[in-house]
């Protein structure tokens, strides 16, 4: 097998990505809706990504938050090289990258308001998990927020056998990790056609070739060729985080913070009688067949009362995640259809059509503020709207760098918005922005939407 560290695939780069859930405004929103005071930005803030990959999220967030200090840490030199090149070409000076293990990392600044770790915790061995927790314990400020994502049980249970078999086959195949996983997954899929119960409901029934846009083969290699791949139960993760003083806040998958959106009434009634928080969350995961979690924790957090929570939500800035004409007012959830087509959501979308805006600036009568807030939260949970920053950041240089890379080996599919986030865009739209030709009519709504954010 190709050489690896801590049982991790290192002969092929991970895929470039931007994760909006890791943005400070998004994490602050999770805290506020959970009645936890988010970190103060009065004197700036510091943010660290453990296992930053190619650095896409760190660079894009640094560009859109010039008052923040950003750090990315990853053990793969090629990842760090890519991240540094992107930051240099985009003239982003407030981000640093370190090619070092978590246990040896001594970044500056020494303390962070936000520490995030996406796609790491359930893919590494127990020693590396401990190093990650030790880093958090040493470097997180009181009141700071931590994001940890991981494959979750019981939903990933069917993939335990699949992953073991896939990796066992891959060990017999020569070549790179991409070659080995491609060969192995083809063989496992052939076995799955025989309908053995052991592969029922597993990834064996997914064809990465048919979903190459969503599941690049490099992603599949990093996901499944890991020696220490192990889905986790939420209670075990919470117990480990409690040892370093962290308490649960909520989920960065916003819709998961609302039982009524994802659970039918009978399931909600069953949970109502469970008083222990960790047991309730484990039971909830069984009811949802939860397969992936994005947990947010806090260190020595302070509770918000109802009035302070209300004021913080009204003072929060939001933007549309898509053109107004593309906003859906109904989404499918594990509880059925969530419908939110009403005068309040229509009013919010209409006002945000002109660009990012404070929720409190949407004109409404005092007696309607409760409905305004509730419907804004629904739009966020449905990913039609997202929490962002109130100030504009200079992102032109970085976006020009991204557009120049189109069609090349380091092509990126996201553009930065000045309000503290980035959007994944259709490559045809990005090429049109880069070449300035006449744009296809089907993309004009997106072009006009980007123009509202200063991208043309």
Image: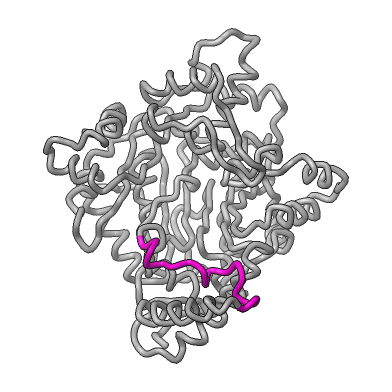
Question: Nearest the camera: 165 or 6?
Answer: 165
The residue lying furthest to the top in this view is 365
Tally of numbered discs:
0
Which residue is painted at 35% across and 74% down in the image? Answer: 12
Asked whether residue 130 appears in the rendered view, the answer is: no
> On the rendered image, what quadrant is the C terminus found in?
top left
| Figure check: 447 above or below 128 | above
Asked whether residue 249 appears in the rendered view, the answer is: yes
Which residue is painted at 38% across and 23% down in the image? Answer: 353
Which residue is painted at 54% across and 16% down in the image? Answer: 343
> On the rendered image, what quadrant is the N terminus found in?
bottom left
Magenta-colored stretch includes residue 200: yes
- Residue 24 x, y percent position in the rendering: 49, 41
- Residue 324 x, y percent position in the rendering: 39, 27
204 to the left or right of 337? left
Question: Nearest the camera: 134 or 239?
Answer: 239
Q: In terms of image quadrants, where is residue 374? A: top right
128 to the left or right of 92? right
| Figure check: 256 above or below 165 | above
Question: Nearest the camera: 104 or 280?
Answer: 280
Which residue is painted at 50% across and 82% down in the image? Answer: 167
Magenta-colored stretch includes residue 138: no
- Residue 7 x, y percent position in the rendering: 50, 80
Model colouring: one colour
Q: Main secondary structure of the magenta part?
A: loop
The residue lying furthest to the front in this view is 194
Question: Nearest the camera: 249 or 319?
Answer: 319
Region in magenta:
196-212
- Residue 367 x, y percent position in the rendering: 65, 10
């Amino acid at each position: 097998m190709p050489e690896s560290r801590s049982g991790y695939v290192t002969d092929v780069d991970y895929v470039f990505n931007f994760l909006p859930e890791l943005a400070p405004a998004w994490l602050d929103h999770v805290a506020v809706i959970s009645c936890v005071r988010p970190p103060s930005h009065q004197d700036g803030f510091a943010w660290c990504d453990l296992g930053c990959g190619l650095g896409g999220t760190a660079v894009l967030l640094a560009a859109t938050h010039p008052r923040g200090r950003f750090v990315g840490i990853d053990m793969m030199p090629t990842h760090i090289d890519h991240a540094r090149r992107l930051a240099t070409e985009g003239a982003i000076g407030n981000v640093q990258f370190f090619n070092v293990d978590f246990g040896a990392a001594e970044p500056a600044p020494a303390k962070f308001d936000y520490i995030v770790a996406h796609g790491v915790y359930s893919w590494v061995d127990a020693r590396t998990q401990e190093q990650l927790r030790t880093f958090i314990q040493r470097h997180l400020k009181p009141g700071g927020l931590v994001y940890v994502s991981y494959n979750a049980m019981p939903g990933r249970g069917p993939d335990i056998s699949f992953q073991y078999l896939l990796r066992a086959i891959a060990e017999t195949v020569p070549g790179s990790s991409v070659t080995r996983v491609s060969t192995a997954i083809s063989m496992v899929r052939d076995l799955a056609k025989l309908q053995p119960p052991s592969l029922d409901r597993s990834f064996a029934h997914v064809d990465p070739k048919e979903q190459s846009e969503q599941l690049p083969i490099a992603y599949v290699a990093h996901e499944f060729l890991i020696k220490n791949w192990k889905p986790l139960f939420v209670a075990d993760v919470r117990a480990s985080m409690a040892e370093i003083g962290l308490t649960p806040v909520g989920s960065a998958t916003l819709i998961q913070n609302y039982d009524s959106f994802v659970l039918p009434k009978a399931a909600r009634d069953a949970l109502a009688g469970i008083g222990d928080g960790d047991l309730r969350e484990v039971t909830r995961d069984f009811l949802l067949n939860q397969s992936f979690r994005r947990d947010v924790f806090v260190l020595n957090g302070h509770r918000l009362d109802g009035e302070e929570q209300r004021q913080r939500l009204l003072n929060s800035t939001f933007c549309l995640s898509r053109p107004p004409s593309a906003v859906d007012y109904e989404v499918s959830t594990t509880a059925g259809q969530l419908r939110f087509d009403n005068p309040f959501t229509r009013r919010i979308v209409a006002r945000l059509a002109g660009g990012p805006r404070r929720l409190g600036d949407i004109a409404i009568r005092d007696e309607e503020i409760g409905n305004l807030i509730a419907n804004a939260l629904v739009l966020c949970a449905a990913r039609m709207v997202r929490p962002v920053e109130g100030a504009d950041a200079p992102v032109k240089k970085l976006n020009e760098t991204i557009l120049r890379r189109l069609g090349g080996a380091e092509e990126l599919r996201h553009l930065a918005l000045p309000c503290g986030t980035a959007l994944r865009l259709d490559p045809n739209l990005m090429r049109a922005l880069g070449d300035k030709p006449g744009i296809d009519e089907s993309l004009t709504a997106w072009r006009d939407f980007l123009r509202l954010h200063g991208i043309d």
